């Protein structure tokens, strides 16, 4: 009798690396600065529960203040992401 095979165990870090390579970050300029956010496939799972501005703050992280100083806000980031990928920062 053959022993049952063990289920395959996947490494999340490897999956994230693969997805990051397949779906690179989105970079854009505003006010002469370059900003970068992750591709939507790598957005935090709970981002849909946030307002547009709070979602944009999460995606931009330390870049948020500079983005706002350059004239940006959550709605404009949403418009950019929608234009680039057809996805949106949750409303």
Image (cartoon, rainbow, N blue to C red):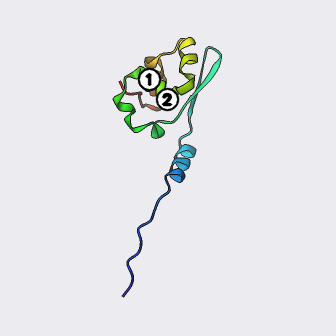
Count of numbered labels shown in the rendering: 2
Q: Quadrant of residue 33?
A: top right
Front: mark 1 or 2: 2
| CA gap, disc 1 and disc 2 | 11 Å
Identify the residue at horizontal 39%, vertical 81% (top origin). 3
Left or right, residue 50 beside residue 18: left
Image quarter of the C terminus: top left
How crowded pointer 2 is (Cα within 10 Å; few <14, some 14-19, many 20+) is rated as: many
Q: Check the image and name the residue furthest to the front.
A: 62
Q: Nearer the viewer, residue 79 or 69?
A: 69
Residue, disc 2 = 59
- In the image shown, does 44 or 38 lie closer to the viewer? 44
Numbered disc 1: secondary structure: helix
- Identify the residue position indicated by label 1 in the image: 78
Q: Is residue 69 above or below residue 79?
A: above
Nearer-N-terminus badge (1/2): 2
Residue at 56% x, 35% y: name it: 25
Along the viewing direction, whichever of 32 and 3 lies nearer the viewer: 3
Q: Is residue 77 left or right of residue 25?
A: left
Quarter of the image that includes the N terminus: bottom left
Badge 1: few (under 14), some or many (20 or more) residues near its Cα, within 10 Å?
Answer: many
Residue 23 in percent (x, y) is at 53, 41
Q: Secondary structure at mark 2?
A: helix
Picture quarter containing residue 4?
Answer: bottom left
Residue at x 49%, y 29% (from the top left corner): 59
Furthest residue to the bottom? 1
Q: Position of residue 10 (x, y in %)?
A: 47, 59
Pinpoint residue 65: horizontal percent, then vertical percent. 55, 17
Image quadrant in which you'd find residue 62: top right
Pick out the residue farthest to the right. 32
């Amino acid at each position: 009798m053959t022993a049952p095979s063990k289920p395959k165990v996947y490494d999340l870090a490897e999956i994230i690396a693969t997805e990051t390579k397949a779906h690179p970050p989105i970079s854009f300029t505003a006010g002469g600065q370059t900003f970068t956010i992750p591709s939507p496939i790598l957005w935090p799972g709970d981002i849909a529960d946030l307002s547009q501005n709070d979602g944009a703050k999460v995606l931009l992280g330390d870049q948020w203040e500079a983005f706002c100083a350059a004239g940006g806000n959550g709605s404009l980031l949403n418009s950019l992401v929608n234009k680039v990928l057809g996805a949106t920062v949750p409303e």
